[in-house]
Amino acid sequence: MAYEKPLPVVNEESRPFWDACKRHELILQHCQACGAYGFYPRMLCKACHSDRLAWERVSGEGTIYSYTVCHRPAGPAFKAEVPYVVALIELREGPRMVSNIVTPDAESVRIGQAVRVTFHDVTEDISLPKFVVKG
């Protein structure tokens, strides 16, 4: 069955990130000038505006900073998954990223819970980083 949900737009700036996800690795840009990690991929460091960015593998661990439980699907392709959790994850390295919390019990999710990344292969070329609560 074909994947019917929206897919990320892969461009020159984001390609290394998505290629790493395909390998089930989480990488972030790390500024060689100020030391800040950044997400979403960009040409300049969001902290100091340096262009000295290097890709580095990161822990894939973080905490739930905020979340919502979606009881109404965002469209027909999401109908079978309700309720599902969309969360803002604060990664151990600092940046925050929006993703899903994969759980059989959406109502059990709480701010501050420790999470780790997992990858869902949705097409031949795209694996999406999602998170699970650490046991």
Image: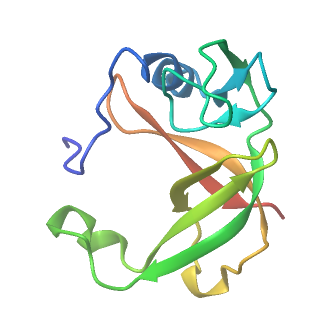
Picture quadrant of residue 135: bottom right
Relative to 94, residue 98 above or below: below
Viewed as shown, does residue 12 lie left or right of 50?
left
Color style of the picture: rainbow
User: What residue is rendered at 59% in x and 87% in y?
Assistant: 107
Q: In this orientation, which residue lies closer to the viewer: 89 or 13?
A: 13
Residue 10 as seen in the image, left or right of residue 57: left
From this view, report whether residue 112 is shown above or below residue 72. Answer: above
Q: For residue 78, what is the image quadrant?
A: bottom left
* Residue at 36% over, 86% down: 71
Q: Total number of numbered labels?
A: 0
Percent coordinates x, y for residue 60 in the rendering: 73, 41
**34 or 117, nearer to the observer:** 34
Direction from residue 29 to residue 34 in the image, left or right:
right
In the displayed orientation, state which residue is furthest to the left: 76
Q: Residue 39: x, y in percent?
A: 58, 38
What's the residue at 59%, 80% (across, down)? 105
Q: Which quadrant of the view contains residue 82?
A: bottom left
In the picture provided, is 24 more to the left or to the right than 41? Answer: right
Q: Quadrant of the N terminus?
A: top left
Q: Is residue 54 above or below residue 105?
A: above
| Towards the viewer: 131 or 12 | 12
User: In the image, is residue 113 above or below residue 38?
Assistant: below
Residue 93, position as x, y percentages in the image: 80, 41
- Residue name at image x 29 percent, y 71 percent: 80
Position of residue 134 measured from the top left corner of the image (x, y, whole percent):
80, 61
